[in-house]
Amino acid sequence: MNDGIKQMAARIRNLFSLGEFQKRYDDGKVQVKTIFGRVVEKREAFPYGFKAKAKKGTVLVLCQGGNFDGVEILPVLDYEGGPELEAGDAALYTESGGWIIIRENGGIEAEAESGGVTVKTKAGKFFIGEDGNVEINGDSKSFVTFEDLETALNTFLTSLNAHTHTVSTSGGPAAQTGTAAPMAPPLTLNISAAKTAQVKTA
């Protein structure tokens, strides 16, 4: 009776074991060394839809039935780092400083310490570089801002409407010289319909 209780207690005690991440193999397995000195090599078991490749940290080893012959390596734990969060927030982050935060209010924030932020679909790519420049499906062409284009066109039209020519005629009863009147009515241009409300910049 006592021996049976001791065995059960040992199995319960051994259900979980802490260890330290040692190294990662090309085939996806990781090597972990438990606090008891036992070396375990196996793939990490991740929650559905999540995957990571930690370079260091504490590991929780699950021993099925309290037996090391049936172990599962849970994702590497990290007690330091990560962005500042408010109550209800969740985040993905890396040691180098890049992170994505899903805010409790429904907002999503992404920050890259280096390398920029890329959003891809099968149809295209959106990229924000470290210098703040934005690329949509490449960088071979440039956008123009509505306000700058409108100002340039109106400046051109003002000059065009005020422009005159010196003219002279000959071959008639009397030769004439003078200045041609400006265009009447003056040219106007309205490009307000080209202004986009969905994409803006400073």
Image: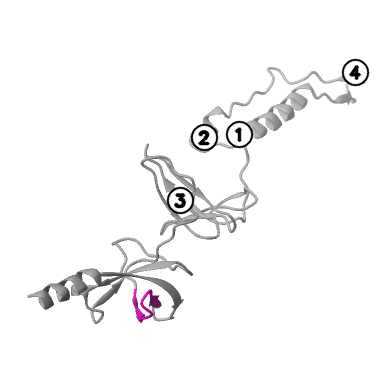
Mark toward the start of the polypeptide (2 vs 1): 1
- The x, y position of residue 6, in whole percent, is 16, 74
The answer to which quarter of the image holds residue 153 is top right
Q: CA distance from mark 4 to mark 1?
A: 53 Å
- The x, y position of residue 121, in whole percent, is 42, 56
Mark 2–mark 1 contact, CB under 8 Å?
yes
| Image height of 82 relative to 34, above or below | above
The answer to which quarter of the image holds residue 33 is bottom left
Tell me the amino acid under the disc marked 1.
Phe
Query: Mark 3 highlights which residue?
Result: 100
Query: Mark 1 highlights which residue?
Result: 146
- Quadrant where the N terminus is found in the figure: bottom left
Query: Mark 4 highlights which residue?
Result: 173
Tell me the amino acid under the disc marked 3.
Ile
Mark toward the start of the polypeptide (3 vs 1): 3
- Residue ID at (62%, 37%): 145
Please tell me whether mark 4 sits on a helix, a strand or a loop. loop
Mark 4–mark 1 contact, CB under 8 Å?
no
Q: Residues within 10 Å of mark 1 (few under 14, many from 20)?
A: some
Please tell me whether mark 1 sits on a helix, a strand or a loop. helix
- Quadrant where the C terminus is found in the figure: top right
